[in-house]
Amino acid sequence: MKNEKTYELVLTALFTAIIVIMAFTPLGYIPLVVINATIIHIPVILGALFLGPKKGAFLGFVFGLTSFINNTFKAVTASAFVFSPVLAADVVGISGVFKSLYICFVPRILVGIVPYFVYILIRRLLKSEQKIWPVVINGAAAVILFISARAFIINLAKNNSGSGLYGTIGGLVLGALLFVILTVSSAKQKSTANIALAYAGLAGAFTNTLFVMSGIFILYKDAYANALGIAGDAVIDVIMGIISFNGIVEAVVAAILVTGVGLALTHVKPVKEFQVKEPKKA
């Protein structure tokens, strides 16, 4: 028990250090053809899986804190105020303090909680004797990839008149391919951990993107539009563009890295499972 607590303490400190280093150096971003995909949430997701949701939430808080510091003191973008209560107070008044606290911290804390329960759920469903669950899970992943790939291709080729058709065909091909791969993999008992880790990575990345962008739209629609110099009605298009580009790429990167690193870590320490305490006898 003492060795277990020491190990978890060391691993928590290690993940915290990695988050800080990534946040304040270019190491937290992967340069791609059209965007930079952030990977700062990867240690948060891994922390949730191997240390449990409580420590995962703490790592998510650290992630949010680094975002707050970066956006407050660097403010490299016009919309930095959405992550900084200090700047938001100047832009929209005292209400901005609470709005930015939510956007900066709540989604990041959830990144340290949601993946853990997604992993447990997917792993148990794939191990279930009811064979329908693997089909449902694999089908859901294929549909998500179809929708995401279609949006990504349409945005990538939006100046092309056939972008909708290209997006649909590309999405169908990738979705069908993923379904086949997952179906074959889920038939192997050892592969259920791989699939569950991939889902946890996807869930963590999408949790961050969806909660941040929806928070910006709900809480900061007009202020965000003014900061970007666009009409208020165009905010939803900008947000959907970010989700279909950054969100998809970051989710795919997270799925790959969480699966790879997660499998390596499982040789040292298994994913933290629920521990149900026995009731004390009278």
Image (cartoon, grey):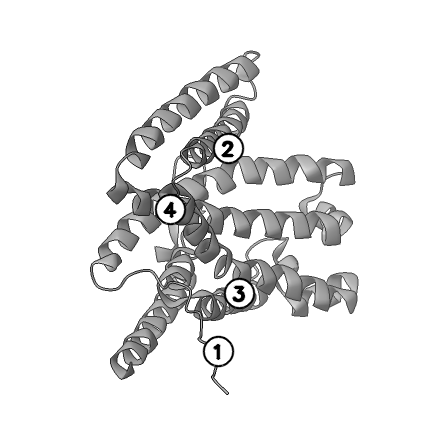
Mark 4: which secondary structure?
A: helix
Q: Which residue is mark 3?
A: 64
Q: Amino acid at mark 1?
A: Pro
Report the residue at 34% width, 77% height from top.
9
Instruction: Judge whether residue 85 can be spotted in this image.
Output: yes
Q: Which residue is mark 1?
A: 279
From this viewpoint, which residue is outermost toward the bottom?
Answer: 282
Comes first in the chain, label 4 or label 2: 2
From this viewpoint, which residue is outermost toward the left?
Answer: 267
Mark nearest the camera among 2 and 3 is 2
Comes first in the chain, label 4 or label 3: 3
Q: Which residue is mark 2?
A: 144
Locate residue 161, reporting x and y percent: 57, 12
Q: Which residue is mark 4?
A: 196
Report crowding for label 4: few under 14, some 14 to 19, many 20 or more residues within 10 A (C-alpha): many
Occupied quadrant, residue 89? bottom right
Q: Amino acid at mark 3?
A: Gly
Mark 1: which secondary structure?
A: loop
Q: What separation in Å lies between label 1 and label 4 (alpha carbons)?
A: 31 Å
Q: Are marks 2 and 3 in contact (CB under 8 Å)?
A: no
Report crowding for label 3: few under 14, some 14 to 19, many 20 or more residues within 10 A (C-alpha): many
Comes first in the chain, label 1 or label 4: 4
In the shown orientation, is residue 90 left or right of residue 268? right
